[in-house]
Amino acid sequence: MISAAFFYLFSAVVVASGFMVISARNPVHAVLFLILAFFNSAGLFVLLGAEFLAMILVIVYVGAVAVLFLFVVMMLDVDFAELRAGFIRYLPVAATIGIVLLMELIVVLGGWAISPELKKTVASPFTQGTSELTNTQAIGNVLYTKYVYFFEVAGLILLTAMVGAIILTLKHKEGVKRQNVAKQTARRPDTAVEIKQVKPGTGL
């Protein structure tokens, strides 16, 4: 009974937050409603026994993606009034796409059925031999054993993309002193220190 009450509570907040994301006039408020929707979606994952997905949703999407969206919206001076000016012009195309997507959802939901055996597997831990493992431990065992090479390749691809993005966006300003590590380590005492003979009373 308590699980059902929390399910309807989280679901209602997710639906309301999703509606406010697309209807809010202020883009900052829209991002905040998106963060609220992510938190409540994580609550639904916890009720389903998928605590790993819930933590990923909170840490990755709320902690990184949504906060990044919020910073970008707040820092960039975007003229949203100008962006909304073309709303009426693209309304027929958007309405057509929306109707097509709605028809596809009706077809999918109309032919979808819940398997009777599915209720037995919900929120039940993965068993391997005689020891019981949580979902997070089971995912870690599979990810770092069977798919370890794919995991490492994905990490290298993301690292390459990050380095490439930094190189493409990095701009050096003229007249700014920068540290040259190779030049500093190559210095010798005869080039690092300069001895001046100062006559008394003359100063430097």
Image (spheres, rainbow, N blue to C red):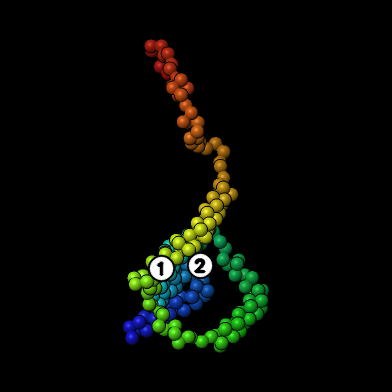
User: Residue at (45%, 65%) from the top-left corner?
Assistant: 142
Q: Position of residue 128 (x, y in %)?
A: 38, 71
**Looking at the rendered structure, which numbered label has been put on residue 87?**
none
User: Residue at (56%, 88%) from the top-left corner?
Assistant: 110
Residue 144 appears anywhere in the view: yes
How packed mark 1 is, by other alpha carbons closer than 10 Å (few <14, some 14-19, many 20 or more), is some
Q: Is residue 192 above or below residue 105?
A: above
Residue type, mark 1 in image: Ala
Image quarter of residue 46: bottom left
The total number of labels drawn is: 2
Residue under numbered circle 1:
138
Q: Is residue 8 above or below residue 46?
A: below
Mark 2 residue element: helix
User: Residue at (46%, 31%) from the top-left corner?
Assistant: 185
Residue type, mark 2 in image: Pro
Q: Is residue 11 left or right of residue 100?
A: left
Which comes before the other along the chain, label 1 or label 2? 2
Mark 1 residue element: helix
Residue under numbered circle 2:
27
How packed mark 2 is, by other alpha carbons closer than 10 Å (few <14, some 14-19, many 20 or more), is some
The residues tagged by marks 1 and 2 sit, at their Cα atoms, a distance apart of 39 Å
Q: Is residue 70 above or below residue 48?
A: above
Q: Nearer the viewer, mark 1 or mark 2?
A: 1
Residue 67 appears anywhere in the view: no
User: Residue at (35%, 82%) from the top-left corner?
Assistant: 3
Quarter the C terminus occupies: top left
The one of 127 and 101 positioned closer to us in this rendering:
127
Quarter the N terminus occupies: bottom left
Q: Position of residue 73 (x, y in %)?
A: 51, 62
